[in-house]
Image (cartoon, grey):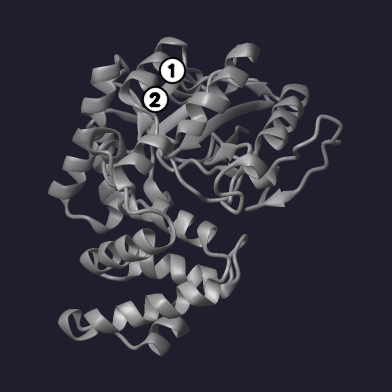
Amino acid sequence: MLTIVMYHYVRDLERSRFPRIKGLSLEAFRGQLDYLQRRHTVVTMEEVMFAVEGSPADLPDDAALLTFDDGFIDHYTNVLPLLDERGWQGSFFVPTRPLLEKKVLDTHKLHFILAAQPNTHAVFDEMLDLIDEYRERYDLLSADEYWERLAQPSRFDPPEIVFIKRMLQTELPEPVRAAICDRLFSRYVTRDEEAFAAELYVSVDQLRIMQRLGMHIGVHGETHSRLDRLGPECRQREIRSSLELLGRIGADTEAWSIAYPFGAHDEALRRQVRSAGAKIGLTTEVARADLWRHDPLQLPRLDTNDVPKQFSSARVPVMVGGAAA
């Protein structure tokens, strides 16, 4: 069994410009690393690749793999030093557009819109008003129809937040999602997207340093789109963009890993990435990975919130996705 932990924002939340962003505080991250050091053996992505190519028994029984999605500057300034001082590897999955074009991805615009505006109802109502402007042109459903289909609570969000996220991350046509996110982002966060992107994401040079320090850099697409909803050519462009970035920083482009944006994948996508050299594919299914049973391109992960954040925590098995965490 392999415990794969998934992280996103890791920052000094209370002192940040956006303390309401859904992330992990530095104090909690340090505590979680202490817990993992006490209870697990942190392994590298290369060791996991070797195990799936050979025998899962090559990994220790308490193996853990640390993964960080979305290429945030947090991972360079906050995560890297703490991993480096322990001699641990992290696996970092970076979408290429923010780095190369200084664009803030729509999914991250939404995170900061919700963090900047504590009145969720105001965002909700404004989103619906903006959708009305595009309804006829894009033959959109009524708000009630979307609500009935999408407004279900998740593990971490109430129905209203889930509804906003699903509408602006995956449900609406891409041009509509982009236009609404742009307008809300300009209203609640900033009009200077380029400067914000420079503050939010790592740079190519920083990635190169992480690579040289032994961190693993993996594929996360170009635009953080749901790859299972794209055609073969669009998926190929997303994969090619990521592999070109790996080549620029000196990472392996022959045997690589991918964290599927939004955890979304299908059989056709798995065939495509496998043929291009992918050895490991990470989903957002919540479970520990059973390397004897799981397809290496469909490995589940635990969210950081599923793992204790204190050194003193006793190891109490928690059933997550049918497996003890």
Numbered tag placed on residue 210 in the rendering: 1
| Tag 2 and tag 1, C-beta contact below 8 Å | yes
Closer-to-camera residue (48/190) = 190
- Residue that appears at 42% across and 59% down: 110
Given the current orientation, which residue lies at the most extreme left position?
233
Quadrant of the frame with the N terminus: top right
Closer-to-camera residue (297/124) = 124
- Residue that appears at 38% across and 70% down: 167
Identify whether 289 is placed above or below 36: below
- Residue that appears at 29% across and 51% down: 227
Residue 310 in the figure: left or right of residue 98: right
State the image coordinates of residue 291 (x, y, percent, origin top left): 53, 33
Q: Which residue is mark 2?
A: 217
Numbered tag placed on residue 51 in the rendering: none
State the image coordinates of residue 49 (x, y, percent, origin top left): 44, 23
State the image coordinates of residue 217 (x, y, percent, origin top left): 39, 25
For the residue labelled by badge 2, is the local secondary structure a helix, a strand or a loop?
strand
Instruction: Give the mark nearer the N terminus: 2 vs 1.
Output: 1
Identify whether 296 is placed above or below 264: above
Single out the mark in the foreground, 2 or 1.
1
State the image coordinates of residue 83 (x, y, percent, origin top left): 59, 19
Residue 197 in the figure: left or right of residue 24: left
Could you tell me the amino acid type at mark 2? Answer: Ile
Spatial distance from mark 2 to mark 1, Cα to Cα?
A: 8 Å
Quadrant of the frame with the C terminus: top right
Identify whether 29 is placed above or below 271: above
